[in-house]
Image (cartoon, helix red, strand yellow):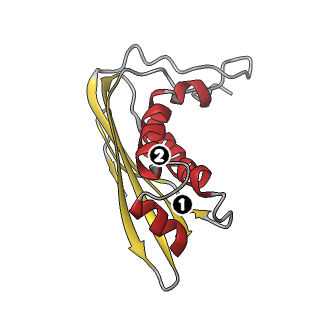
Amino acid sequence: MSDFTHINRQGHAKMVDVSNKDITKRTAIAHSSINVNVTIYEQITNNTNQKGNVLNTAQIAGIMAAKQTSQIIPMCHPLPISGVDVQFEWHKHESDYTLNIQTTVSTTGRTGVEMEALTAASATALTVYDMCKAVDKSMVIGETYLVQKTGGKSDFTR
């Protein structure tokens, strides 16, 4: 069992000790998306959804989620988040639209913010769904994945 970083010698879960790691600037970018119909697209872009401004609310949800990641992902360290940015880009298909979501999270610390960026992207997509489900429950949240990570021992770019 000792080969697993999150398992102690007794075979139980543990949080990894990062106190010996170097303090560096760390960033992570994550992606998610949600496919919506034309009616929802028009409500979002015209700000006519009866629940309010969908994208502003979703941005706030993403920021809040990044800051609370350690509360919902068991082995994540609570981190002093330096910044969170949530951006949107629309892509039109034949009969529907995809809202692409990109989240960027940064900190200066001993461990990375990949989970915070992924959590932010997920919560942003879920919030769009929540605010629009009265119009159409068939929306589909797309793949959520890490785009880039910098800082620490290694960098990663998809």
Task: Tell me: residue 152, above or below residue 80.
Answer: below
Three-letter code for the amino acid on which mark 2 is drawn = Ala
Q: In the current view of this chain or complex, which residue is farthest to the top?
A: 19
Q: Residue 5, image x and y in percent?
A: 57, 28
Q: In the current view of this chain or complex, which residue is farthest to the left?
A: 25
What's the residue at 51%, 75% (across, down)?
A: 38
Q: Secondary structure at mark 2?
A: helix
Q: Residue 127, image x and y in percent?
A: 55, 47
Task: Tell me: residue 45, above or below residue 66.
Answer: below
Q: Residue 67, image x and y in percent?
A: 45, 28
Residue 37 appears in view: no
**Residue in front for this viewpoint, 19 or 103:** 103
Q: Using residue 59 as the reference point, say whether residue 155 is left or right of it.
A: left
Three-letter code for the amino acid on which mark 1 is drawn = Glu
Judging by the rendered image, the residue that carries numbered circle 1 is 143
User: Gap in Å between the C-alphas at discs 1 and 2?
Assistant: 17 Å
Judging by the rendered image, the residue that carries numbered circle 2 is 58
Task: Tell me: residue 78, above or below residue 132.
Answer: above
Image quarter of the C terminus: bottom left
What is the total number of numbered labels drawn onto the structure image? 2
Q: Using residue 50 as the reference point, say whether residue 114 is left or right of it.
A: left
What's the residue at 58%, 49% (across, down)?
A: 126
Residue 96 appears in view: yes
Residue 88 figure quarter: bottom left
Pointers 1 and 2 in contact (C-beta within 8 Å):
no
What's the residue at 40%, 45% (across, down)?
A: 56
> Badge 1 local density, few (<14 within 10 Å), some, or many (20+)?
few
What's the residue at 45%, 60% (across, down)?
A: 44
Task: Tell me: residue 139, above or below residue 83.
Answer: below
Q: Residue 90, image x and y in percent?
A: 38, 67
**Residue in front for this viewpoint, 74 or 92:** 92
* Mark 1 or 2, nearer chain start: 2
